[in-house]
Amino acid sequence: MSEPPAAGRLVVVGGGPSGLAAAWKASVEADRAAASLEIVVLEADDQVGGKVRTEQAADLLIETGPQGFLDDQPVLREMIDACGLKDDVLAPEPAANRRYIYRGGRLRELSRSPLAFARSGLLGPLGLARLAMEPLVRNRQDGDTEGVAGEDESLFDFAARRMGRQAALRLISPVVLGIFAGDARKLSAAAAFPRLVAMERAYGSLFKAMRAGRRRGTPPPGHRTFLHGIQSLPQAVAALPGIEVRCNQRVTAVERRGSGFTVTSSAADLGADAVVVAADVPAAADLVDSVSAAAADELRQIESPPMAVVHTAFETAATAHIEPAYGFLVARGEGIRMLGCQYETATFRGRGPAGSFLTRSLFGGSVDPEAAGVGDAQLVELTLRELRRTAGIDANPTYTSVARWPHAIPQYAPGHPQRVARIEAALDPIAGFHLAGNALHGVGLSRAIAVGADRGEKAARLLLN
């Protein structure tokens, strides 16, 4: 038997950051309207957070999903304040400003100093000369289609056009691995890095845009986390009044019923006046199917490859030669399967006890999905072998762990903005149905939260007005 739909019931599918942001923002709207709105979050796992997962092991703080977030969304700061976590926000250590790229058989610092960067060997003389010419490169005009899918330029083509092919290969491509675990040739510049495209449009040059930002005194968004781990945020949101979270309830279908919906889960059928779906891409496509087959077909075209995250801890005596830093990324073609490695204890305080050095190595993604399927023991062995070769860590670890994400980071292929427009055109006429998560508008945690909050606000206003 289906439960009778409650007056003003919003059901959010997915208890990750985006879904919980939707629930929180809907509760805020209800409070402002002094109205009653039932908000139910259905989460398939036994705890909230989605891919945001913090674990404690061997006195170490282990982040198996996102390590941190960009402080670039006002709504995220508002949500942090509402949860009482403002004083728990943690900035990185000063050493985290140092970042490296492994290229040509050694680590090379990605320095902000022009002279140090020129000496790093990341680019050769011709590459440096071409990079210096970036302000002189013609601004791409609307309608230019060379090297693009339709009118959507790949990130690699964008970087090569503005900064030169060498910079696109040796700088931009490794950086993309650290954000998307993806191939810059197969990502949309407009969708994956909209800020870069906007900088070119506004100033005609990336360098000119950065100089203008410095003159205005506008700092770049800061990288942040929480003192007790990033999962603190979804856990705090789930505990807020006005939000009911039901874990261990996997949603298998969302169907339209009259002016509302029926949400079918492993526990029961639940009537809803509005629904926000905030699941990963494959699950979202399946749930959207009964509401809009056209939107579901488009979602299924978005690749979401697997990843594995390997943590290894060492005694600091074995890593004394390592300069404290955020870590390094690995250029492709170096014979290294690791996408990159983050030095956790050098980046944020409280990640491990004194005398420990915790690393977090990433494998898989669209450039090497098979690596994510390697067995645990073999993957740890591969990690240790590659840390020895890249960072010179030649010691037995005091701790190891492997976490796997079958569908990790959505890949915004060229043509993604057009795909998003088609999905939204298919879903917009369906009153009360909203799609959140990171499938469409940004893969970063802060962006997913902003999207979720926007969808929650729209759903609440529809029900409350």
Image: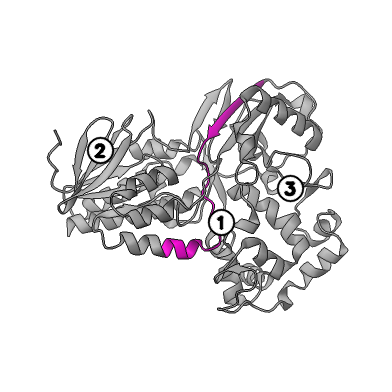
Crowding at dot 3, Cα within 10 Å, few <14 / some 14-19 / many 20+, comes out as some
Tell me the quadrant of the picture where the N terminus can be found. top left
Whichever of labels 2 and 1 marks the residue nearer the N terminus, that label is: 1
Asked whether residue 401 is drawn in magenta, I would say yes
Q: Position of residue 431 (x, y in %)?
A: 23, 58
Please identify, in this view, whether the residue under mark 3 or under mark 1 is nearer the observer: 3
Disc sitting over residue 221 in the figure: 1
465 to 314, vertically: above or below = below
Residue 386, percent from left and from top: 76, 33
| Real-space Cα separation, disc 3 to disc 2, in angstroms | 44 Å
* Rendering colour mode: one colour
Mark sitting on residue 264: 2
User: Three-letter amino acid code at disc 1?
Assistant: Pro
| Disc 3 to disc 2: CB gap under 8 Å | no
Compare marks 3 and 1 and give the one earlier in the sequence.
1
Magenta-drawn stretch contains 312 = no
Location of residue 291 in the rendering, given as x and y in whole percent from the top left corner: 28, 52
**Neighbours of disc 2 within 10 Å: few (<14), some (14-19), many (20+):** some
Question: Which amino acid type is marked by label 3?
Answer: Arg
Tell me: residue 333, above or below residue 2. below
Q: Residues within 10 Å of mark 1 (few under 14, many from 20)?
A: few
Q: Is residue 359 left or right of residue 25?
A: right
Q: For the magenta stretch, what is the residue range?
A: 399-421
Residue at 66%, 28% in the rendered image: 379
